[in-house]
Image (spheres, helix red, strand yellow):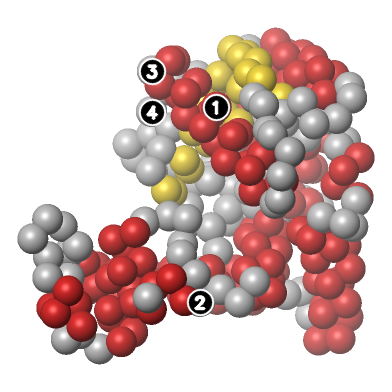
C-alpha cells in the first residue's frame, strides 16, 4: 500500500504559489496537494517547443488544474540549438517559472522532485566528478524554488495521482536512454541495487542530507573567512587553507559551480 504523501513546505511559503507542472504524474500530484494545503496554486506549464505535440501537455495541465480548482498559466520558451540541451532547457524553464512567480505575486515556485530524483541526481553528479556540493544533491529550497516532495518516494507520489483519478501525460522522452538521467534511472540504479541487494534511494538521499548540512556549514565558514566583496584582498585568500580558499571562491562566483581548474586559477 502506498504511503500517504505530505508536503514539506517552509513556514514562510504562503498562498499563492506557482507549481511547475509538466503534466506528468509527479507534478499533477503536487498541484493537487498544494490545493489541499490551501496554497492557491497556479499550475504553470512551460513549453520548450522541442518536440511535436508539446501543446498536448499544456492541455493535460489545464484540464487537471480545472478539475482541482487551481489556476493555470501556459508559458513558451525558445531553446536554441547547441550543446547540453537538457541544461539549457532546464535554465529556460526555471527563468519562465520565476517570471510567472513575480507576475502572479507568488511566494515560491514549487517543483515536484522526489527522493528517487534526488538519488539519481547524486549518481549523475558522481559521474560528472562533482565535489561534495554536487554529491549533496538538490536542496529542499534554493531562493524561491522549493521542493516539497523531496522526502517522498516516486511510487507514493504517483499513487496519489492515481487515487485522485488524474490522467497524467507520459513523456516518451523519459524512456530515451541517450539522456544520461534516463540511463541512470532505467539501467544504472537498478543494476547497482541488484548487486547490493538493497534499495539504494534511502542510502543516497541520507548521504545527500549529511553532505548538504556539511556544505552549508563550510560555506558559512568560507564566506566569513573571505567574503569576496569590494576591497577583498587576494593575499587574504591565499593565506587560507586550500580547501577553505576553494570553497570561498566558489561561494564568491556563485552558481553554476565552476570547474576545479577555474577555481584554482
CA–CA distance in space, label 2 to label 1? 29 Å
Task: Estimate the spatial distance between the alpha carbons at disc 4 and disc 1, rounded to whole Å.
Answer: 15 Å
The quarter in which the C terminus is drawn is bottom left
Relative horizontal placement of residue 132, taking residue 181 as reference (left or right): left
Measure the alpha-carbon separation of dots 1 and 3: 14 Å
Which one is earlier in the sequence, the residue at label 4 or at label 1?
Answer: 1
Side of 258 where 77 appears, left or right: right
In this view, 136 is above or below 33: below
How many labels sit on residues?
4
> At which x and y percent is residue 203?
64, 76
Q: Where in the figure is residue 121, as x and y percent of width and height?
A: 65, 62
- Which residue lies under the disc numbered 2? 131
Along the viewing direction, whichever of 194 and 123 lies nearer the viewer = 123
In this image, 75 relative to 209: left or right?
A: right
Is disc 3 surrounded by few (<14), some (14 to 19) or many (20+) residues within 10 Å? few
Q: Identify the residue at image location x=44%, y=15%.
A: 104
The part of the image, by quadrant, that contains residue 230 is: bottom left
Marking on residue 185: none
Amino acid at each position: 500500500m502506498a504511503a500517504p504523501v505530505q508536503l514539506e513546505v517552509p513556514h514562510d511559503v504562503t498562498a499563492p504559489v506557482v507549481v511547475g507542472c509538466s503534466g506528468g504524474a509527479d507534478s499533477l500530484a503536487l498541484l493537487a496537494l498544494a490545493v489541499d494545503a490551501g496554497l492557491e496554486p497556479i499550475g504553470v506549464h512551460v513549453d520548450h517547443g522541442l518536440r511535436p505535440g508539446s501543446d498536448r501537455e499544456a492541455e493535460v495541465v489545464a484540464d487537471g488544474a480545472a478539475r482541482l480548482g487551481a489556476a493555470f498559466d501556459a508559458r513558451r520558451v525558445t531553446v536554441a540549438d547547441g550543446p547540453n540541451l537538457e541544461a539549457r532547457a532546464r535554465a529556460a524553464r526555471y527563468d519562465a517559472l520565476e517570471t510567472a512567480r513575480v507576475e502572479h505575486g507568488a511566494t515560491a515556485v514549487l517543483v515536484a522532485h522526489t527522493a528517487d530524483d534526488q538519488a539519481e541526481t547524486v549518481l549523475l553528479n558522481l559521474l560528472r566528478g562533482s565535489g561534495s556540493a554536487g554529491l549533496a544533491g538538490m536542496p529542499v529550497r534554493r531562493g524561491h524554488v522549493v521542493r516539497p516532495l523531496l522526502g517522498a518516494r516516486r511510487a507514493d507520489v504517483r499513487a496519489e495521482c492515481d487515487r485522485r483519478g488524474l490522467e497524467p501525460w507520459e513523456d516518451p522522452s523519459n524512456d530515451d536512454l541517450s539522456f544520461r538521467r534516463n540511463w541512470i534511472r532505467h539501467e544504472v540504479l537498478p543494476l547497482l541495487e541488484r548487486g547490493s541487494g538493497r534499495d539504494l534511494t534511502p542510502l543516497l538521499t541520507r548521504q545527500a542530507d549529511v553532505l548538504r548540512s556539511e556544505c552549508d556549514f563550510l560555506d558559512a565558514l568560507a564566506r566569513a573567512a573571505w567574503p569576496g566583496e569590494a576591497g577583498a584582498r587576494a593575499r587574504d585568500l591565499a593565506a587560507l587553507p586550500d580547501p577553505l580558499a576553494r570553497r570561498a571562491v566558489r561561494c564568491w562566483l556563485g552558481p553554476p559551480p565552476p570547474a576545479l581548474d577555474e577555481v584554482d586559477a
